[in-house]
Image: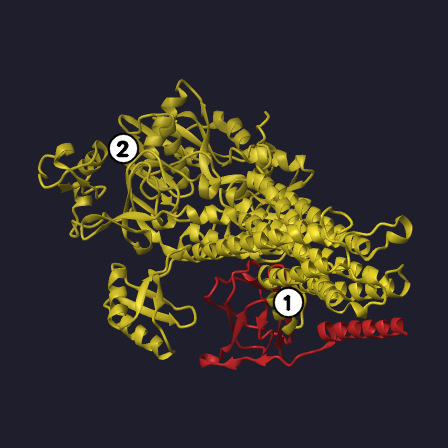
């Protein structure tokens, strides 16, 4: 076995490729061998066995991730701590491990956070803790959720068991409750029926005590905290029905008339069964509302192949530390975030960015953990691990946002705080009215209507309406590469009527590219471009770089120039083969004695289009004009058209001069341009728009956009931009495309529509249901609601709300618009 | 006669509900000041928050340690809207929640659905 010095893979002798002069090395592929041949010294540094150095500038390429890079740190879950002094013991033990910079132990959460120099192995930390007499294991991402799920499953199963018990008891109880309805039931008032009813009293008490136990414990816990909830209402309702029935059975003398001696054991048993079943179904449905988050967590790779001490080993992803060199093979999931140090491949990033096309990666490119490598082999240096990775931060952001409140919910919360006690008061009032004014037997009617009021009211439906839709909506956003920071942002987004777009990096790519090659004289376009690109090879100017890239995209041969000379701000000259090439502005040409008058109209036209034009002369005579410009992202036009279709006013804001700004605006179809705006004035411009009564979304990517992002009603940051912009934004468009704005607004509309449906449904249910239960229809139509029906309605109203929220899971996003010419 | 008695009992019960759930006020538990001036309070989450009223002073950091002792999903998250806090409470774990109140006032902490509620009194 030999190690490939380029990619670090261990290669078997059978499939080995070698290079003359370096018999000790083997290569996994022609690509690695070729790279090695090109520059062996690069891979044979003093730390020969280690990783090749990252390309210069690789660090700055890591722009897509969300937060700052810290010293490598791991989190450990601890066991065996009994008192606060254990904290000091464990911290001391950790500090004694060489390379540990900082160790903090949290007694409450039983976790240790250890910061360390790279290269310290987690096993050493764990053994240090074990030696001190405690237990430790790496804190696995998502382990909390597994425990949470297990807890839910247990609760669900136990509720189902409780339901079956209540249901089985309910059947005979219903049968024997209606002697006048069912045949074979002993006559009312007979000793036999009284005996059966006695048995029913006992069995329904068992149903209350076991199947309905959570109503009573829940009600008691709430009562102690001076609050009331669904449990209180159900507990009071079913126990009132049971108590009345039992008193009627045991003390028949208490009632003046024999026909008052009715029993409602069936109400107790059936309502308990239904509400327990409803709770079980609700738990199941609610687990689905956080499915998107679980899917995100599930994206995390389990293991990583890293190079340690020159050997390729497979380790759990939690043990990867910053600066580890990770090997990725075709089809592998990339375990953590990093920067490619060797190799070329295409990576499917759709799960994180929503971008469906694979993204090319080569040396210096940043890779995101949890994305999937497709074609090639490559190695990368880990830059963010554990809870710092982009995925972990997305998960955290989604989790936080899902728990945040939408403004609409704050109103609902105020109502729901008064809801349950108000229902109890209504029930008492109902009892009093029926008892005083109701038909005979008044007591029976009073008990039945009061119990029905208690049982039909559903504060849960009201409480669940907003948060469940928000959970699903925000999760859905993450699936589409749209990270919504709060319920506030999600709710405000549906009211947006004006979208302000920053030009550079948002509408455009933010990098100059070659746009035009105009030939003058007898040259062909390819000749002019090849010569200009060759001359520019030595230049480090971004415009030169754009020309070189333009040439290579046309597969032109670029030669190495000689006698390269640059005059900053004006132009360059160089000898390419036998030709002498001069490239620059018109003044530069005049200085070099080139007659460039013929180029004037072309240069003017290109400048009008907002492009930077450069004149090319070959061997002292004019050869053509090249234009370089910041180009529009290919989906900007379609996205802006979709925004117009949504009847939104689109405004572009830029520090550029009006000519350039107008040229870009024309290309993408923007009608209002705010040009020559100083960076510090962007927020003011947003404020001015807001003063016109507009609800403004600001979309930007740079540090200079941050104040405007914060000022806007909704700030949307491009995921390809700076961390500062993302911190200031309310919504991050991970993919960095304007189509994300359309998706975000559409998602907001869909979610808020869903919330409204839920709220209207829950409010209508309660405001109609409670009076009907109280018997307002009785004087007019002789209609009275059965408490059993009320129980069924209540049990399924909250399930309905959650199920309606779950309908959002099927949301597919706005239909993609074709760019119409 | 009986009707009058029922009405009196009914009105009494309504009055008791109004007083107990809405009008009565509780002192609450004062947070203890730990190392570094952090005001700490341990809150048990089981069918409600115990204690459900916590008193802290404004201007210095507060650490509320929530310990959820039930599987009921209603209480799986605690939200303190005023301080932008939203924390998952895995069953059995103690989850510290930290923030610094800068102004006196009464702030609510509640479950996500607003069914369980507690109050933070900042003085």
Q: Is residue A438 above or below residue A648?
A: below
Residue A201 percent coordinates (x, y): 67, 62
Q: Quadrant of the C terminus of chain A?
A: top right
In the image: residue A333, left or right of residue A223: left
Residue at label 2?
A560
- Mark 2, chain letter? A
Q: What residue is shown at x 34% (from left), y 71% (from top)?
A: A80
Residue ranking furthest to the front: A191
User: Which of the 4 image quadrants contains residue B119?
Assistant: bottom right
State the red chain: B
Q: Is residue A381 above or below residue A818?
A: below
Residues under labels 2 and 1: Cα distance? 83 Å
Residue at label 1?
A219
Q: Secondary structure at mark 1?
A: helix
Marked residue nearer the N-terminal end (2 or 1)? 1
Q: What residue is shown at x 31% (from left), y 65% (from top)?
A: A136
Q: Quadrant of the N terminus of chain A?
A: top left
Decide: few, some or many residues near mark 1? Use Cα within 10 Å; few <14, some 14-19, many ≥20. many
In the image: residue A2, left or right of residue A248: left
Identify which residue, A596 or B27, lies in the foreground.
B27
State the yellow chain: A
Identify which residue, A470 or A606, lies in the foreground.
A470
Decide: few, some or many residues near mark 2? Use Cα within 10 Å; few <14, some 14-19, many ≥20. some
Marks 2/1 in contact by CB < 8 Å: the verdict is no
């Amino acid at each position: 076995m030999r190690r490939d010095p380029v990619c670090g893979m261990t290669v078997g002798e059978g499939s080995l490729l070698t290079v003359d002069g370096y018999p000790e090395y083997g290569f996994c592929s022609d690509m690695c061998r070729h790279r090695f041949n090109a520059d062996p010294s690069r891979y044979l540094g003093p730390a020969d066995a280690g990783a090749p150095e990252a390309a210069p500038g690789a660090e700055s390429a890591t722009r897509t991730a969300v937060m700052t890079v810290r010293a490598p740190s791991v989190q450990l879950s601890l066991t065996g701590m009994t008192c606060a002094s254990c904290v000091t013991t464990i911290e001391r033990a950790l500090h004694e491990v060489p390379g540990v910079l900082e160790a903090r132990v949290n007694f409450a959460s039983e976790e240790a956070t250890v910061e360390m120099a790279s290269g310290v192995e987690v096993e050493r930390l764990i053994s240090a803790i074990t030696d001190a007499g405690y237990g430790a294991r790496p804190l696995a991402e998502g382990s909390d959720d597994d425990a949470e799920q297990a807890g839910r499953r247990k609760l669900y199963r136990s509720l189902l068991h409780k339901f079956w018990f209540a249901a089985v008891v309910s059947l005979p109880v219903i049968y024997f409750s209606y002697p006048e309805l069912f045949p074979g039931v002993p006559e009312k008032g007979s000793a036999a029926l009284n005996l059966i009813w006695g048995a029913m009293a006992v069995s329904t008490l068992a149903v209350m005590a076991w199947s309905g136990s959570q109503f009573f414990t829940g009600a008691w816990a709430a009562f102690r905290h001076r609050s009331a909830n669904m449990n209180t209402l159900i507990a009071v309702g079913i126990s009132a029905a049971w108590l009345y029935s039992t008193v009627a059975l045991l003390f028949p003398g208490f009632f003046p008339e024999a026909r008052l001696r009715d029993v409602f054991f069936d109400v107790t048993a059936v309502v308990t069964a239904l509400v327990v079943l409803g709770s079980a179904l609700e738990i199941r449905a609610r687990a689905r509302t956080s499915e998107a988050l679980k899917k995100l967590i599930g994206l995390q790779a389990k293991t990583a192949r890293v190079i340690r001490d020159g050997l390729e080993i497979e380790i759990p992803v939690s043990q990867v530390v910053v600066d580890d060199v990770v090997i990725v093979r075709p089809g592998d999931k990339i375990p953590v975030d990093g920067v490619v140090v060797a190799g070329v491949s295409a990576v499917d990033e759709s799960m994180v960015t929503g971008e469906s096309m694979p993204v090319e990666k080569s040396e210096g490119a940043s890779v995101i953990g949890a994305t999937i490598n497709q074609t090639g082999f490559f190695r990368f240096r880990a830059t963010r691990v554990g809870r710092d990775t982009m995925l972990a931060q997305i998960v955290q952001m989604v989790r936080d946002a899902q728990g945040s409140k939408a403004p609409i919910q704050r109103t609902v919360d105020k109502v729901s705080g008064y809801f349950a006690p108000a229902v109890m008061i209504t029930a008492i009032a109902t009892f009093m009215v029926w008892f005083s004014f109701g038909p005979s037997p008044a007591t029976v009617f009073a008990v039945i209507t009061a119990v029905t009021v208690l049982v039909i009211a559903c504060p849960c439906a009201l409480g669940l309406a907003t948060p469940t839709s928000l959970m699903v909506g925000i999760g859905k956003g993450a699936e589409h590469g749209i990270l919504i920071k709060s319920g506030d942002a999600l709710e405000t987004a549906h009211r947006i009527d004006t979208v302000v777009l920053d030009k550079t990096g948002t509408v455009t790519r933010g990098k100059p590219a070659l746009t035009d090659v105009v030939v003058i004289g007898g040259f062909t376009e390819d000749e002019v471009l090849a010569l200009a690109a060759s001359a520019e090879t030595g230049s480090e100017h971004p415009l030169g770089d754009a020309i070189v890239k333009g040439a290579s995209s046309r597969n032109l041969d670029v030669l190495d120039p000689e006698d390269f000379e640059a005059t900053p701000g004006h132009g360059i000259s160089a000898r390419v083969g036998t030709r002498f090439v001069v490239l620059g502005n018109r003044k530069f040409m005049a200085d070099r004695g080139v007659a460039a008058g013929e180029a004037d109209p072309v240069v003017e036209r290109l400048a009008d289009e907002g492009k930077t034009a450069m004149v090319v002369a070959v061997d002292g005579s004019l050869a053509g004009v090249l234009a370089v410009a910041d180009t529009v992202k290919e989906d900007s036009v379609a996205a802006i058209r979709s925004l117009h279709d949504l009847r939104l006013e689109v405004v572009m804001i830029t520090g550029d001069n009006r000519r350039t700004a107008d040229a870009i605006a024309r290309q993408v179809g923007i009608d209002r341009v705010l040009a020559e705006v100083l960076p510090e004035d962007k927020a003011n411009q947003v404020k001015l728009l807001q003063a016109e009564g507009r609800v403004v979304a600001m979309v930007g990517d740079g540090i200079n956009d941050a104040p405007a992002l914060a000022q806007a009603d909704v700030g949307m940051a491009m995921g390809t931009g700076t961390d500062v912009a993302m911190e200031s934004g309310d919504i991050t468009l991970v993919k960095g495309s304007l189509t994300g704005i359309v998706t975000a607004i559409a998602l907001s509309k869909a979610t808020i529509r869903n919330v409204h449906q839920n709220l209207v449904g829950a409010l209508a249910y309660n405001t109609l249901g409670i009076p009907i239960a109280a018997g307002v229809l009785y004087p007019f139509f002789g209609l009275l609601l059965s408490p059993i029906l009320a129980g069924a309605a209540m049990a399924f109203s909250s399930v309905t709300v959650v199920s309606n929220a779950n309908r959002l899971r099927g949301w597919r996003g706005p239909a993609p618009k074709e760019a119409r010419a | 006669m009986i009707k009058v008695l029922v009405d009196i009992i009914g009105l009494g019960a309504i009055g008791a509900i109004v007083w107990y759930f809405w009008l009565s006020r509780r002192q609450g538990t004062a947070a203890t000041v730990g190392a570094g001036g952090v005001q700490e309070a341990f809150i048990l989450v089981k069918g409600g928050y115990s204690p459900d009223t916590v008193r802290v002073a404004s201007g210095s950091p507060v650490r509320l340690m929530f310990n959820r002792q039930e599987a009921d999903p209603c209480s799986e998250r605690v939200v303190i809207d005023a301080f932008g806090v939203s924390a998952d409470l895995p069953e059995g774990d103690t989850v510290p929640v930290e923030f610094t109140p800068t102004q006196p006032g009464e702030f609510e902490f509640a479950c996500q659905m607003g069914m369980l509620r507690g109050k933070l009194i900042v003085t």
